[in-house]
Amino acid sequence: MLRRALLATVLLAGTAAGAAEFVSVAEPAILYDANSLKAKKLYVATRYLPLQQLVLLENWVKARDAAGKMFWIEKRKLSRKRYVVVTAREAIVRQSWSSSAPLAFRAERQVGLEWLGNVGSWVKVRHRDGSTGFIRNTDVWGE
């Protein structure tokens, strides 16, 4: 009985630790329905697409995207450099982590932004043009 409880605790801890790990696509990559180059090709992922890692194998990663779709991707096509994708129709990026802070820039849905860290309910991001600022964590996915 104690052994079973310990095993359940270890499994849950491993799942929780892996569930929060995000990566991004390093270069355009094919997404598959199984962990094999012979599997059915589902989509082509664009560079910087944030993905949540679900299962890690030697050469493959089972991942989930912002829409909740699951697939397999070759591990070598991934980067530890993190990005988030805007999920709101239009998101306001502020100069600091306050709703009253001046506007830094606006970002439309599906725009990828480099993740620079979290500050409470805000995410520090960098646009590809070099602009930085803070966006509400409810307006992005991948953080």
Image (cartoon, grey):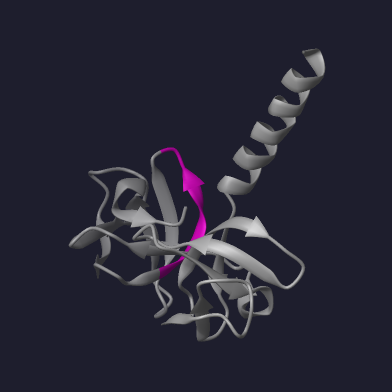
Q: Position of residue 54 (x, y in %)?
A: 58, 54
Question: Relative to 10, is 6 above or below?
Answer: above
**In the image, what residue occupies the spot 50% across and 63% down?**
51
**In the image, what residue occupies the spot 41% across and 68% down?**
113
Q: Which residues are magenta?
A: 113-120
Q: Position of residue 37 (x, y in %)?
A: 62, 84
Q: Is residue 118 left or right of residue 88?
A: right
Extreme top residue here? 1
Question: Relative to 46, is 50 above or below?
Answer: above
Magenta includes 111?
no
Q: Position of residue 92 (x, y in %)?
A: 24, 58
- Viewer-closest of 29 and 71: 71
Q: Is residue 74 left or right of residue 10?
A: left
Secondary structure mostly taken by the magenta-highlighted segment of the chain? strand
Q: Is residue 80 visible?
A: no
Within the image, what quadrant is residue 103 found in? bottom left
Within the image, what quadrant is residue 126 found in? bottom left
Question: Relative to 40, is 93 above or below?
Answer: above
- Viewer-closest of 15 and 103: 15
**In the image, what residue occupies the spot 28% across and 59% down?**
87
Q: Is residue 41 visible?
A: yes
